[in-house]
Image: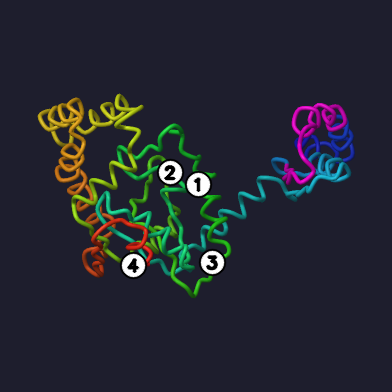
Amino acid sequence: VGTLYKQVDPFEAKKVGAAMVAANLGKIIDERFLTAPRDTKILVYCWRGGERSLSLAHVLSRIGFDVYFAPGGYKRYRAGVLEFLRGMDKFRYHVIAGKTGCAKGKLLDALEAAGAQVIDLEVMANHRGSILGEEPGAREQPSQKMFDSRIAFKARTFDASRPVFVEGESSMIGKVQVPSTMWSGMRIADVTQLEIPMSERVKWIRAGYKHFETTETGRLLECIDVLVKRVGHERVSAWKTLVADGQWDEFVQDILENHYDAAYAAAAARSRPQEEEKAQVLFLDDTSDETYAKAA
């Protein structure tokens, strides 16, 4: 229909589009909205035009649903997201840095609860930023476009005169990339370096990755195998022995000390040099809610 509209005649295209809408309306309502409650909120959009989606929106609104229509379709929406992301360097970022297992995400949650402006990139990316970072049960990360949309949606209400708190990340989180303007702002940001005792890091890691000790131990072993090129067969074999013996505290501490801490230091020196140069250290004794709320 869009091609017909552009290349032949808008009137002819509208007739074809109207026929398609009329033929599909009953099916759409039967399949998607017949059992929907009255308070259902519906967003209707096309790829780029709007004539067909406007017709559907009209019918749904006449039924009594709360209907939203996107003029210009997804194409215009995506252009708006990209335009917003190009201006992400207008914000003043404050990076929460720290080694794996320091509960940086928990501090971000506490900051947000206290009224701060926060973008949790790992939550938006559905990934914890490491080789073991897949979320349990749902390993699919969002597409780059969805990741972009989540950031833009969250940041669109932010006040540029106030800091935006983010976790110290690489430019890639799993398979999605932090917007370049945001990343450039993060690289020159103020930094708080979070530190907690090793015993607390081990407890936090075990609590967050419980699925690797129960239902997805096989997946853990697959992930460990990927590290052979970095730490060698002997180290990986030792980790697998600890896993097989159920020595989880020892395994977590060893993989932190002999892989993650070194990898974190190298990534920070390469991508985030300001962490070492200007970071203010925040040492916390434990990961309790009270401790992190007070720190925020």
209 is within the stretch colored magenta: no
Three-letter amino acid code of the residue under disc 4: Ala
Three-letter amino acid code of the residue under disc 2: Val
Earlier residue among tags 3 and 4:
3
Where 14 sits versus 188, above or below? above
Q: In the rendered image, which residue does mark 3 sit on?
A: 158
Marks 2 and 4, how far apart in space?
30 Å
Three-letter amino acid code of the residue under disc 1: Phe
Marks 3 and 2, how far apart in space?
23 Å
Residue positioned most to the left = 234
Mark 1 element type: helix
Q: In the rendered image, which residue does mark 4 sit on?
A: 295
- The location of residue 28, given as percent across then percent down, is 79, 30
Magenta region, residue range: 20-45
86 left or right, relative to 237:
right
- The location of residue 278, given as percent across then percent down, is 25, 70
Q: Are marks 2 and 4 in contact (CB under 8 Å)?
A: no
Marks 1 and 4, how far apart in space?
29 Å
Q: Quadrant of the C terminus?
A: bottom left
Q: Please tell me the numbered disc located at residue 176.
A: 2
